[in-house]
Amino acid sequence: MDLDPQPSPTLIVQLLDRARGVPVQSWHVTGPVARIGRARECEIPVADPYVSRQHAELRFGEGTWLLVCLSQRGVLVGGAPVMIARVTENLQFKLGQAGPELRVVPAAELPADLPTMSLPSLPVQRIEIDEALKTKEVAAIAESDSFRALLDKARQLRKDRSD
Amino acid sequence: MATIVSVHSFRGGTGKSNSTANLASLCAQQGYRVAIVDTDIQSPGVHVLFGIDEAQAPRCLNDFLWGTCRIDEAAVDVTPVLEGGVEPVAGRLFVVPSSIKSDEIGRVLRDGYDVGRLNDGFRALIKSLALDLLFIDTHPGVNEETLLSLAISDLLVLIMRPDAQDYQGTAVTLELARRLEVPEILLTVNKVPPSLDAVKLRVDVARTFGVEVAGVLPLNLEMVEVASGGVFVTRYPEHPFTRELRVIAGRITVAAAPAARRA
């Protein structure tokens, strides 16, 4: 399919929160092609293990935006798998049975001051280890006689097994 | 020479027993002779996944520990359960279950058991069943039995959730495993919600714990639906969860002695 040489209207694509269905992230898409997938090179990168690296794309051609499925996991609109769908007002689609939902909103229809994020950011998971506490807890166990005896036994057993 | 793999978690609910059963099944599918010993005597669970009931298992680990049978007499060949799935099974899988009778569990908790006998039992089992891999499904937390499992293991798979309650305890267990000179240690993060960036999580975990991350397993709703009524990987051979688990199984079998690999 030849891509239309005229500039395409902007779309806004929103990633919806699974539980509440409200937008948590959005992208401005100017076209002519916007790839959706787990790969970082995509114009719409979605970090989700159920999403394929190149899952779908939005393509502008012959005066209209189309949603095209690129993945075996499928793209679902209204619960039904589609290969190509015309982008209509508020089109909502799912990246595979287990994947996230996205929604397309024509940019012209949005008020100018709409914030990109509709929810406060979810806290980023930080993995914190209290090293001092860890050292104390380890010492309490590792410095016991029974632990030392176990270590001696372990060394002996490993030596026996490799002989 | 068989490889002894301990699968351990600091807390319960990480998906340890399910993961052990599914990992062992994947190894058996690939042609290895594998056994799982359920040493979680206080809360046994592996037998459920394979549909083992009292009729099939008149003897269990408890009987062996109390000296009333040989360990191989307590082993159940569950390969037919795997053969019910789509993938062919080139190896064999055995399970030594723990007793589910509450009075027997109570007896163990009161009287304890000879931990040294457990180690002798593992070696006898490996010999009698000609095993390539022996998986030990341990009781969560740090106690005498789990430390013994670590001491006799060639490989430790630590499983945790991406949850603050798991991190500290897993770090302590990891350090104890190092002190016990466990030759190889792998960490697996399970039940990862889709909102977390799995790639970033893997990097963060590896960096924080200073250990190899063998796999990052997604929160698996289909697994919840199976509800331990079967072996997930045989029902869903192409599920993303199964694929990631297969990578972990491959990593485990790489650690297995080369002489043990089947053609």
Image (cartoon, coloured by chain):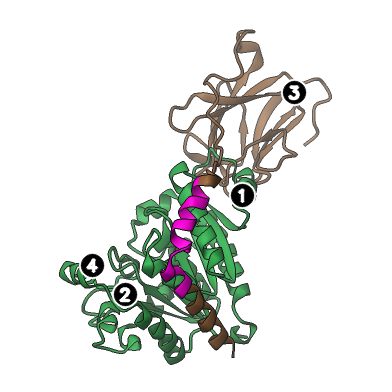
User: Residue B226 in the image: x percent, y percent?
Assistant: 36, 57
Magenta segment boundaries in residue numbering: A133-149
* Residue for badge 2: B97
The Cα–Cα distance between marks 1 and 3, rounded to whole angstroms, is 33 Å
Marks 1 and 2 share the same chain: yes
The Cα–Cα distance between marks 4 and 1, rounded to whole angstroms, is 38 Å
- Tell me the residue at 32%/65% (across/down): B45
The Cα–Cα distance between marks 4 and 3, rounded to whole angstroms, is 67 Å
* Residue for badge 1: B202
Lower sequence index among marks 4 and 1? 4
The Cα–Cα distance between marks 1 and 2, rounded to whole angstroms, is 33 Å
Q: Main secondary structure of the magenta part?
A: helix
User: Residue A4 in the image: x percent, y percent?
Assistant: 80, 26
- Tell me the residue at 59%/52% (across/down): B209
Q: Which chain is green?
A: B
Q: Which chain is brown?
A: A
